[in-house]
Image (cartoon, rainbow, N blue to C red):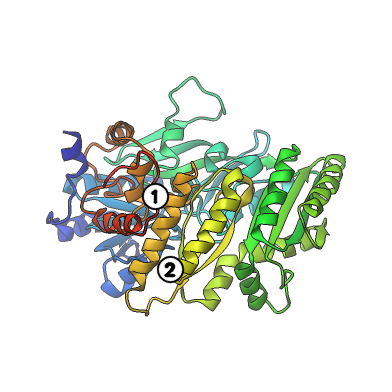
Amino acid sequence: MLIRLLTSCKPGVIHDWAALERDLKRFLEPKAVVSRREELLVYDCDGLTMDRHAPPLAVLPKSTDEVAAIVAACHRHAIPFVARGSGTGLSGGALVEEEALLIVTSRMRRILAVDLSNQTITVEPGVINSWVTRAVAGDGFYYAPDPSSQVVCSIGGNVAENSGGVHCLKYGVTSNHVLSMRVVLPDGQVTELGGALSETCAIDLRGAFIGSEGTLGIATEITLRLLPAPQEVAVLLADFPSMESAGEAVRRITAAGVLPAGLEIMDHTCIAAVNAAFAEEEYPPEAGAVLLVELDGQSLEVKDAVALAITLCREAGAGEVREAWDEAERARLWKGRKSAISALGRQCPSYYLQDGVVPRTALPSVLAAIDRLSAEHGLVVANVFHAGDGNLHPLILYRASDPGVNEKVKTLGAAIMELCLAAGGSISGEHGVGSDKRCFLDRMFSEDDLSTMKRVRLAFDPDGLANPGKIFPTPKSCGESQRRVVALERSGRRLPDGAGVF
């Protein structure tokens, strides 16, 4: 029964798209329904551009009522749907692989309520991450989760992927800052998850929904926790001769009991790309790696932490250590890190970004292994990542026009995922599983674990209409991944203990 329900929306099912389009046009304005082929190409991929599938039909609702009516229509016609925010996701989560209606929330951009007394703000899913802080900064508050794409990514997408960002080391990820949500369930019903209080006696369905990647429904109103702006903020930029020495500085800082707001490392490839992208050199050009350390809190506390962090960086082998105390200079030091991926894109037309997590103690060995894999596969891998919590973001650079390069890139990506798992890590820290990494999920979890997760999904979506085919491995979707795993085994690299066969 479980398998039957989860595969009920399989490819090859014939849907009456004309009937659904007529139904939708009864309550949506004409420009909210997109059906022309050339216009639908805009939505053929998310930030992971290697795989592309344009949807047969897309809609752009402006309210919870419209979303509920759209989803109810899908339910009546037994047509699957996929929710999409700004399309900046990096795991193929908003990809329409099989025929499904694409529901784009980018027009839902209202800030619905601000309650500074209780430090909350309620927004629609299309509100851009950085807009939240902008709305309350004048009153001395801010919103902590800050993905590198915060000027373009939406809060709805952040909720779907449980996004992190630079400040996740100290302040946590999206789930730590969402109090409640109004959610449209896969049959069109509207419900509330969570509440105004951070603690509740109810089962935490809010926590189950966040990070579910659109497989449990669509959040249409989201109440976020705001934080008072810290009294003092300082940013350090330390350059190191190697990634290993920068990693050693991270180890020393965390071992000393210092808790930075952020700890970020960029390797030499990223440094060169960032310096080339801007008019003047942002970072020391000869450095093997740079470490950005942000410290915040009460003034005396920050001053002491800065002095200690500088000492620890120098003990680990740092050359120059720059300090930034005013907002403009801090933003200047962060600019290169926030722009690293786009800077690399200027140098190479295509990239494949991974999102593995390893224990901090494993960073040196895993980074060295990634360098070896890069050389073996003949592909450049740039590293920029959240060093404080071991969340790696290796970017495999390639040219899509090169024959057979997609398979070569994915084989290297699979090898990097295997490294993370073998080190006791995870296949994703914040980008989600989506379609890109679903074939590695059964290497992390047992059959019983996966079955339990699927039962939770069925409780919300018994007909399997919400973002079908995502997260969980299937024989069809994972056939290609199986061939990559065989290639890894033939190369002599050992798979993690207990790794299953797809």
Amino acid marked by disc 2 = His
- Number of numbered discs present? 2
**Foreground residue among 27 and 358:** 358
Asked if the residue under mark 2 is in contact with the one under mark 1, i.e. CB atoms within 8 Å, the reply is no
Q: Which comes before the other along the chain, label 1 or label 2?
A: 2
Q: Name the element at disc 2.
A: helix
Q: Secondary structure at mark 1?
A: loop
x and y percent of residue 315 in the render? Answer: 80, 51
Can the viewer see residue 360 in this picture? yes
Query: Picture coordinates of residue 52 (x, y %)?
Result: 32, 67
Q: Is residue 168 left or right of residue 301?
A: left
Q: Residue at x 81, y 59 (%)?
A: 321
Residue 58 percent location from the top left of the image:
30, 61
Residue that label 1 marks: 494
Q: Is 13 on the left-hand or right-hand side of 223?
A: left
Q: Is residue 330 above or below residue 78?
A: below
Question: What residue is at 34 percent from the left and 40 percent from the top?
Answer: 216
Mark 2, other Cα within 10 Å: few <14 / some 14–19 / many ≥20: few
Instruction: Name the quadrant containing residue 488.
Output: bottom left
The residue under the point 78% across, 62% down is 328
Residue 377: mark: 2
